[in-house]
């Protein structure tokens, strides 16, 4: 799905990953589920591109529903995979999340689990090699993505700011569709290690001025970073 001149999404509102396209090639943010591989190939083809045009893959954090095709892309195409140092062990499968399950609705949760299982989410292939990044680093990849540390959901959660796409890719730093309840709109994400820290981290994207806020789960938000953060705080305060 094309969102803008430099911006594409694969997957759907349940689990998504993103492609940034420039003349220099393609940068991928997150890798969804393993079954999104065919979606990736099809989207690249629709762009007049191929796997050979992919220059790098950035993980917003190391959870399994963001690792998807990452190791396959690294192993088969030699594409470097980047993750914050604090989540490197998580991406390699050496550390698992212990975040609580939290509130849920049967229908929404069943839909999430069904989709995940259909897309290969029950068989995760962890990374055998990663390149670590740090807060503030600008990567030498198409779009010149800048890393913004967003600890809370996991210790190494990051946002990725790409000015040419007018976008911030936030992973699970927030969500616009709660996968366990089905509630729409900007709100705190489930399965978060430290909810208070995750809420505080939102201040780091609040003043960026980016139009697009692109989560790993939920509808792409084009109402601006400041408004998304305001709504999330309102939801958090109402709980």
Image (cartoon, rainbow, N blue to C red):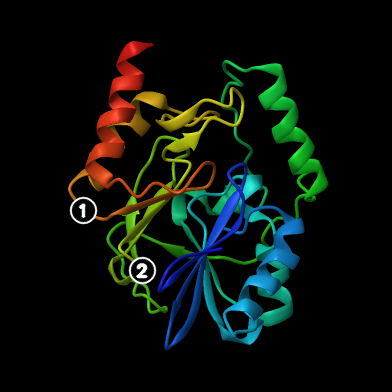
Q: Position of residue 114 (x, y in %)?
A: 79, 36
Residue lying at the far top of the rendered structure: 239
68 on left or right of 215: right
Q: Which residue is mark 2?
A: 145
Residue lying at the far left of the rendered structure: 207
Q: Position of residue 210 (x, y in %)?
A: 26, 55
Q: Which mark is residue 25?
A: none
Q: Residue at x 35, y 20 (%)?
A: 235
SS category of the residue bearing label 2: loop
62 on left or right of 163: right
Q: Residue at x 65, y 64 (%)?
A: 70
Name above or below for residue 223 compared with residue 148: above
Q: CA distance from mark 1 to mark 2?
A: 14 Å
Q: Position of residue 57 (x, y in %)?
A: 54, 68
Q: Residue at x 51, y 49 (%)?
A: 61
**Quadrant (top left, top right, bottom left, bottom right) of the C terminus:** top left
Q: Which mark is residue 208?
A: 1
Q: Nearer the viewer, residue 35 or 77?
A: 35
Earlier-in-chain disc, 1 versus 2? 2
Name above or below for residue 51 compared with residue 105: below
Q: Is residue 213 visible?
A: yes
Q: Nearer the viewer, residue 146 or 86?
A: 146
SS category of the residue bearing label 1: loop
Q: Quadrant of residue 141?
A: bottom left
1 vs 2, front mark: 1
Q: Residue at x 56, y 74 (%)?
A: 80
Q: Nearer the viewer, residue 153 or 28?
A: 28
67 on left or right of 29: right
Name above or below for residue 26 compared with residue 220: below
């Amino acid at each position: 799905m094309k969102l803008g001149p430099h911006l594409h999404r694969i997957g759907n509102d349940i689990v998504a990953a993103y492609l940034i396209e420039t003349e220099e090639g393609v940068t991928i943010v997150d890798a969804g589920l393993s079954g999104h591989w065919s979606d990736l190939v099809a989207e690249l083809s629709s762009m007049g591109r191929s796997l050979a045009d992919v220059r790098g893959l950035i993980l917003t954090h190391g959870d399994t529903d963001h690792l998807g095709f990452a190791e396959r892309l690294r192993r088969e195409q030699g594409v470097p995979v980047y993750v914050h140092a604090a989540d490197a062990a998580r991406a390699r499968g050496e550390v698992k999340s212990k975040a609580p399950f939290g509130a849920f609705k049967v229908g929404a949760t069943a839909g999430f689990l069904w989709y995940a299982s259909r897309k290969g989410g029950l068989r995760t292939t962890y990374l055998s090699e990663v390149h670590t990044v740090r807060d503030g680093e600008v990567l030498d990849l198409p779009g010149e993505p800048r890393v913004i540390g967003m600890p809370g959901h996991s210790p190494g959660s990051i946002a990725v700011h790409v000015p040419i796409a007018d976008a911030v890719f936030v992973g699970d730093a927030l969500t616009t569709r709660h996968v366990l309840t089905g509630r729409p709109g900007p709100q705190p994400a489930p399965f978060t290690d430290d909810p208070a820290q995750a809420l505080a981290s939102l201040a780091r994207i609040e003043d960026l001025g980016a139009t697009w806020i692109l989560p790993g789960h939920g509808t792409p938000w084009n109402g601006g970073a400041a408004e998304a953060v305001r709504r999330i705080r309102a939801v958090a305060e109402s709980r």
